[in-house]
Image: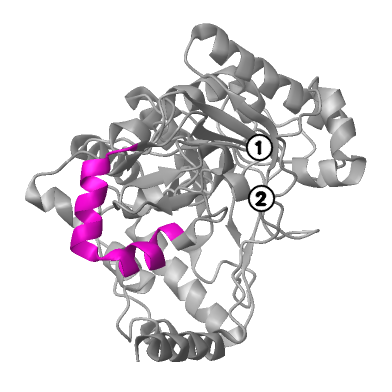
Amino acid sequence: MAKELYNTPNLDELENGPWPSFVTGMKKLATGSHDGASMVRDVLATLETSYVTKKGYWKGGTVGVIGYGGGVIPRFNELKDDKGDFKFKDAGEFHTLRIQPPAGMHYTSDLLRNLCDTFVDNGGSGLIAFHGQSGDIMFQGATEKTTQTIFNELNEIGFDMGGAGPAVRTGMACVGASRCEMSNTNETAALRTLVNAFLDDMHRPALPYKFKFKVSGCANDCMNSIERSDMAIIGTWRDDIKINQDLWKKMVADKGMDYVVDNITSRCPTSAMTVNADTSLTIDNKNCVKCMHCLNVTSPLTHKYIAKGDVEPILATGDDKGVTVCMGGKRTLKIGDLFGTVVIPFMKLETADDYEKIEDFAGECIDFFAENALEHERTGEMIERIGIVNFLEGVGLNVDPNMVDSPRYMSYVRMDKWDEEAAKWFENKAEASA
């Protein structure tokens, strides 16, 4: 049984207010009956000390499992007492195992319970994170001794170690066609193809820095693939958006033309939507940039008409589906945000040959990255340094006028003068209706 908690007045403050606190969850673990409870108790005491001294007490090291060069994030406690011993000895080690999730993050409740029980029954702390931007299931709180045991048991269930360090990292795919009507490709098949092909590069780090795959079924990009992955695969289509004119007219009649113009057609970034005199809709599909806004706001999953029994979408993606491939996305370190450059505007991803082509292309990109990137340099930073033309030549692609250099330049939204502009908008609307 875990001992009584230390006095932690600073951490207690983090439990105040309306929002859930990680402190509450960790205190629950720290007073549990599992073997790792005392570890969590001493971790809380270490964190409380950090709040008092304004210092961090965790350092890295080398911890792994047999046959793997990565996947474990080592954390050793440096907080010692006057005699040089650990001040909180049960938190001397607090390592994290990165475990690959199923593609699309599909679990049964029984499987989730099994994962949790496996972790705590083999000496783990009980602190688990699903999934973060790394994509992994993070089993946080193991010792060097229990790390191998925990992994062995998880491996018996069917799970494998994820990526860490200068290697191919754990890939991510959105839930896709199993739950989402916007899907344009088989997201899970695409991810499994790439992960399976480059598993050795994930488990035995040998690259200049990390390389990430992410797959999103449409340009809504729920996986943040275009800004968080070196190779982003995004589902798309190249024929016309399908329009259910009867449902469209029904919506216009119910919502009114002002609503339709203000919230749908005027928000089309290329002004490709026109409402005709009979309230039918025309879309200039050659100028559609697949931003997804019109499909999102008329989706049967979000629109009120589904409650009336209409489950057909008002607008739907086309039938000629495939993927766009972008390279070089990353977040803010070093040279700032980079959004993936479109290098393959469209390719089909249906047959075995299609999957072999995208696997071969991924291999060319990883090999080129391994040979040409500097240490601790991401793919996007390498492309910025050597030039996109040299990259395309190196991976065997011809320049295509449909390639887009940068869909956006940063992931933030400027809000300066927002209130003033909003006030002007409301004044103009009031004058127009007067």
Label 1 sits on what residue type? Cys
Q: Is residue 171 visible?
A: yes
- Identify the residue position indicated by label 2 in the image: 407
Q: Residues within 10 Å of mark 1 (few under 14, many from 20)?
A: many
Q: In x, y percent, where is residue 174?
A: 42, 39
Q: Is residue 251 above or below residue 226?
A: below
Majority secondary structure in the magenta region: helix
Cα separation, mark 1 vs mark 2, equals 10 Å
Measured along the vertical axis of the image, is residue 18 above or below residue 89? below
Checking the image for residue 34, the label placed there is none
Q: Amino acid at mark 2?
A: Pro
Membership of 258 in magenta stretch: yes
Query: Relative to the observer, which residue lies in front, 13 or 270?
Result: 270
**Which of the two labelled residues, at mark 1 and mark 2, occupies the earlier sequence position?**
1
Image quadrant assignment for residue 185: top left
> Which mark's residue is nearer the viewer, 1 or 2?
2
The percent coordinates of residue 281 (x first, y second) are 36, 47
Q: Secondary structure at mark 2?
A: loop
Query: What residue is drawn where x is 63% and y is 72%?
Result: 56
Does residue 322 appear to the left or right of 70 in the view shown? left
Between 19 and 21, the one lying in front of the other is: 19
The residue to which callout 1 is attached is 326
Say if mark 1 contacts mark 2, CB within 8 Å: yes
